[in-house]
Amino acid sequence: MNSLPPICVTPGDFNGVGPETVLKALTDPEVAENTSFLLLGPLRAWQYWQEKCAYAGPSLTAVTTLSAPFEAGKVYVYNPADELSRFIPQPGELTAPSGQLSMACIATATDLCLSGKAAAMLTAPISKEAVNLAGHHIPGHTEYLAERDGNAEVAMMLVSGNLRVVPLTTHIPVKAVSAAITQQRIISKAHIILKSLQNDFGIAEPKLAVLGLNPHAGDGGVIGSEEIEVITPAISRLQQLGHNCDGPFPADGFFANRTYQQFDAVLAMYHDQGLVAFKTIAFNAGVNFTAGLSFIRTSPDHGTAFGIAGRNIANAGSVKEAITLAKALTALRSRNEPTTTPYPVKKTD
């Protein structure tokens, strides 16, 4: 059998729906085929969820070393935190041990990707509150991974078929958004997006839409001046540099009228402005992709969902899409060849 670098999978918070959705996704033969997977965390914890969701996928094989070959079609389990080897999930509970285990798994997955021992990383959702209880103060996966990857300039790109949405500002309070929007930040983020569209998605001449910040994109300055003073000049500069950018668009009409279908990506001004629309359009089929990293990282676009954890009703659609995208981008990078269809395009309307 072929020996392949595995896709490394972190459980997120073991008390949330992450492990359940990962195992459900791996039950799908099309998702798991031609790929090996390395699940991080105690075998005992994964077996707990295996029983909870009546897992019927490939057997889970525990490994104690990461130097052994990984065979395509198989699922392996490695525990990076010996002190938590006897950890048992408590669905729906907020606990420091689950937060500590989340971070241990993320750190190990990052090490494996940076060293080339993993082909890609798929991260299930963490609880930032649990992580903070464990003493790790990070805004989120994206910021942590960027710092570990040499302080890489990254973009949190939500992907579903040809719909790709990037928030300019991510995990900051809404009251801080306006001050964080600068011409340079818009230009820098646009460059990351456009480069990723070319290198990761094989789009030779990508088109980028930029949203306004205020209702009606400021209405000519009546409802706010950010569009006139910051956003429009940034778009003009990008156009002068030869990039196909347009805006600023009022966010509500842009999504309601499906104007996004005319562009390869959308740059929103803040987290919820872009993500609420994205998750509504791409329900259960969205993927969080970190553009700009030296390695591939994808994630489902939902949270820990503590309220339904342990009830075996979590939908695995987003995890399936995250695995599919990770596999496609891995293949594209390994070939270093452009393609216009790197993964199956889903209808988003």
Image (tube, rainbow, N blue to C red):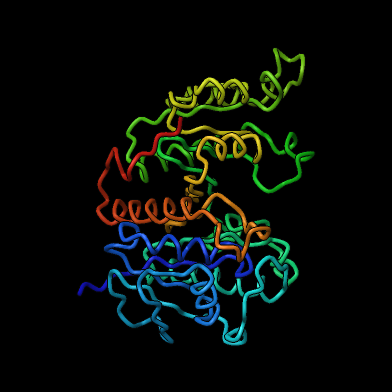
Residue at horizontal 73%, vertical 67%?
A: 94
Q: Is residue 192 above or below residue 60?
A: above
Q: For this view, does 270 lie left or right of residue 105?
A: right
Residue 231, given in percent of the width and then of the height, sits at 63, 26
Quadrant for the N terminus in the image: bottom left
Q: Quadrant of residue 140?
A: bottom right
When the figure is inspected, residue 78 is found, relative to residue 278, above or below; the finding is: below
- What residue is shown at x 64% (from left), y 68% (from top)? 15
- When the figure is inspected, residue 275 is found, relative to residue 93, above or below; the finding is above
Image quadrant where residue 204 sits: top left
In this image, 169 relative to 241: left or right?
A: right
Q: Is 306 situated left or right of 6 in this image?
A: right
* Residue 200, position as x, y percentages in the image: 37, 46
Q: Is residue 334 above or below residue 226?
A: below
Residue found at the far left of this picture:
1
Query: Is residue 151 or residue 300 the one in the foreground?
Result: 300
Q: Return the residue nearer the eye: 214 or 58.
A: 58
253 vs 238, nearest the viewer: 253
Locate residue 220 relative to residue 142 in the image: left or right: right
Residue sitting farthest toward the right: 175
